Image (cartoon, grey):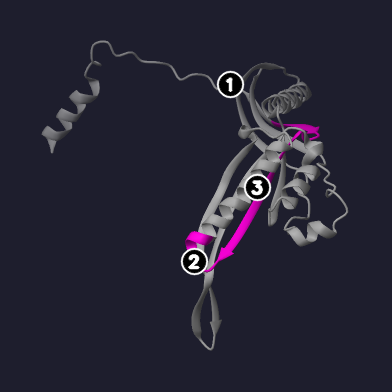
Amino acid sequence: MSRFVIVLFIVLIAAPPAGAQTRAPEPQVPVVVMTGEGVVNTVPDRAWVTITAESRASNPREAQRLNAQAMSAVTQQLKSAGLGDDAIRTRAYDLQPEFDYRDGKQTLRGYMARNSVEVRLDEIERVGEVIDVAVGSGATSVSGVRFDLKNREEVEREALRRAVADARGRAEAAAGGAGMSVASVLRIDETREFIPPPQPMMMRMGREAAMVADGAPPISPGEYQVRVVVTLTAAIK
């Protein structure tokens, strides 16, 4: 037991290794933590429309052939309406069997081919016109319309700038209330939130519905909101 105590004592008083430095604990810097919000409301200037053509036949090859004809007619009319190749892209394609069920038995009815394309419109006022053209040329449904911004990055940066300015102002007010001032900003954490306008309550308009509709359906883009929240940590003195 005595030998153990002597060895432990020697370890404790031994000199630190060469090059080792002792540092005094850094003083704690007083900080203030504040949340700021930046909101930008703007009107969308770009739209996306999903257009679908469905075809049915007794065998898969015929269903596929009919669907290719139908979608080719739709895309040709869209291009004739002034849409470029880069504004039309395939979103989904599937070919599947369809069955009837009676008395617990499954009977093959035929096959259904479905092709969906997404169309980008940079002239948002043409949404209703394009829907009318698509349905009139053979599309069987229009499943959705969504809106967006061409200059999204600029709007995001403006919302961020407003959020930081708001948080900085709050930090300065809090520090001033305590008889201090903001010395420097130590950290900024960001959270983004996009609130798109309400989507139109359409959109499974078939060809029969288009025949009785009076012209192109009216589409209103509403207002788009970009909201940024930041948490700002600032040193005060």
- Determine crowd level at label 2: few under 14, some 14-19, many 20+ residues with C-alpha closer than 10 A: few
Label 3 sits on what residue type?
A: Ala
Residue marked by disc 3: 73
Label 2 sits on what residue type?
A: Asn
The Cα atoms of the two marked residues, 2 and 3, are separated by 22 Å
Residue marked by disc 2: 59
- Determine crowd level at label 1: few under 14, some 14-19, many 20+ residues with C-alpha closer than 10 A: few
User: Is residue 51 within the magenta segment?
Assistant: yes
* Depth check, front residue: 200 or 35: 200
State the residue at coordinates (55%, 22%).
28
User: Residue 196 in the image: x percent, y percent?
Assistant: 74, 42
- Determine crowd level at label 3: few under 14, some 14-19, many 20+ residues with C-alpha closer than 10 A: some
State the residue at coordinates (77%, 38%).
224
User: Residue 118 in the image: x percent, y percent?
Assistant: 63, 44
* Depth check, front residue: 197 or 214: 214
**Residue contact between numbered discs 1 and 2, judged by CB atoms under 8 Å:** no
In the image, the segment drawn in magenta is 35-62
Residue 179 to residue 62: above or below:
above
Q: Which mark is residue 29?
A: 1
State the residue at coordinates (68%, 57%).
140
- Residue at the bottom extreme of this rendering: 103
